[in-house]
């Protein structure tokens, strides 16, 4: 019998079978929840997989779709992030924009020029994710077209940029995710260098956590543990857990066709207020998983 429990030690989860799968959707690139634990999926290639496009699909905790928006606006929704105040930031990697929304889909502002790359070193060239710091500054990882991190005010005015292509400490090779800690330090998943680098608010290199495997997305839980979605097509599929000092304490996740098993590559994840984890998968068709904390 296929097990429906995943994890290890203090991090044990029970898969919620077929969560959200009664809804037609495209590729789920990323996932986030708001203060009411409503679930927002950044979905691309919908409703026609052969063309660019996407939408935000909104679900309740039980997996029933309650809203959708952005169907005629997005090109390739890549990374979604929601603040404690329910501000939504969406990075569109093919459109070269980052947009801020309310939870009902009202556009607040757009950073970048739709369909046009910025000058070299400047915003944007295929951005991957945006996240707001506790002090109110917005950071964007600009990973697919250039190895840069951009810093903005909370209403989208550019402040500075940092990062150069390379392998040494402080250098980047496809920054795929940016996450801000409770200490306002900037955590960057440096995917092709297989590590997480830590910078201060001014872009000064502080330290790094090595040993990751194609890290795509990361969240920090209330106890300061790091949860990283690791995925690369059919080769890598796992959730890595690191202690607050960056030590890897374990991985969980299995390949297969059963409930909760990964068929493609974990690309996005989020932890809601109850400790449940949502994992978005690419390279696997329609894939979103919910794992309830036990």
Image (cartoon, helix red, strand yellow):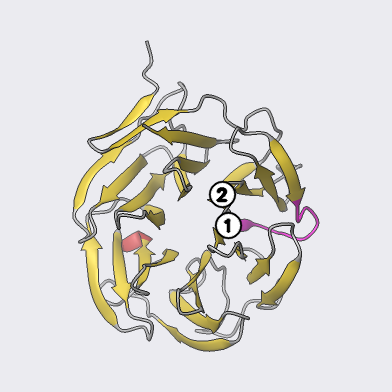
Outermost residue toward the right in this view: 72
Q: Position of residue 44 (x, y in %)?
A: 66, 49
Q: Is residue 104 above or below residue 150?
A: above
* Quadrant holding the N terminus: top left
Q: CA distance from mark 2 to mark 1?
A: 6 Å
Q: Name the mark on residue 29.
A: 2
Q: Name the mark on residue 78.
A: 1
User: Between residues 99 and 60, which one lies in front from this camera angle?
Assistant: 60
* Quadrant holding the C terminus: top left
Q: Are marks 2 and 1 in contact (CB under 8 Å)?
A: yes
Q: Is residue 181 left or right of residue 65?
A: left
Q: Position of residue 255 (x, y in %)?
A: 38, 29
What is the magenta segment's predominant secondary structure? loop
At a point 27% along the width and 41% down the height, the residue shown is 251
Label 1, residues with CA under 10 Å away: few <14, some 14-19, many ≥20: many
Q: Is residue 176 above or below residue 121?
A: above
Which circle's residue, 2 or 1, is located before the other in the chain?
2
Q: Is residue 239 left or right of residue 110?
A: left
Label 2, residues with CA under 10 Å away: few <14, some 14-19, many ≥20: many
Please give the count of numbered marks on the rendered protein: 2
Q: Is residue 9 left or right of residue 115?
A: left
Is 77 in the magenta? yes
Q: Is residue 20 left or right of residue 242?
A: right
Q: Which residues are magenta?
A: 69-78
Q: Does residue 195 appear anywhere in the picture? A: yes
Residue 226, quarter of the rendered image: bottom left
């Amino acid at each position: 019998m296929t097990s429906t429990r995943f994890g290890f030690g203090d991090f044990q989860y029970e898969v919620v079978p077929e969560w959200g799968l009664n809804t037609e959707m495209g590729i789920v690139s990323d996932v986030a929840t708001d203060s009411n634990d409503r679930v927002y999926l950044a979905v691309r290639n919908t409703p026609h997989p052969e063309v660019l496009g996407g939408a935000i699909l909104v679900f309740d905790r039980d997996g029933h779709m309650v809203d959708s928006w952005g169907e005629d606006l997005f090109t390739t929704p890549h990374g979604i992030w929601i603040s404690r105040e329910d501000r939504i930031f969406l990075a569109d990697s093919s459109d070269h924009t980052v947009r801020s929304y309310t939870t009902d889909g009202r556009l607040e502002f757009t950073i970048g020029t739709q369909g046009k790359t910025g000058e070299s070193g400047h915003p944007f060239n295929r951005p991957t994710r945006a996240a707001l710091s506790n002090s109110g500054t917005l950071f964007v990882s600009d990973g697919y077209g250039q190895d840069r991190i951009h810093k903005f005010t909370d209403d989208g005015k550019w402040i500075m940029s940092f990062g150069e292509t390379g392998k040494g400490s402080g250098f980047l090779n496809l920054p795929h995710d940016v996450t801000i800690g409770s200490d306002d330090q900037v955590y960057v998943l440096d995917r092709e260098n297989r590590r997480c680098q830590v910078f201060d608010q001014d872009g000064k290199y502080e330290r790094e956590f090595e040993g990751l495997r194609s890290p795509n997305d990361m969240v920090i839980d209330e106890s300061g543990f790091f949860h990283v979605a690791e995925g690369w097509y059919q080769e890598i599929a796992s959730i890595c857990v690191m202690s607050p000092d960056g030590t890897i304490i374990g991985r969980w996740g299995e390949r297969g066709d059963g409930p909760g098993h990964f068929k493609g590559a974990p690309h996005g994840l989020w932890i809601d207020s109850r400790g449940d984890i949502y994992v978005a998968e690419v390279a696997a068709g329609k894939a979103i998983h919910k794992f309830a904390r036990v």
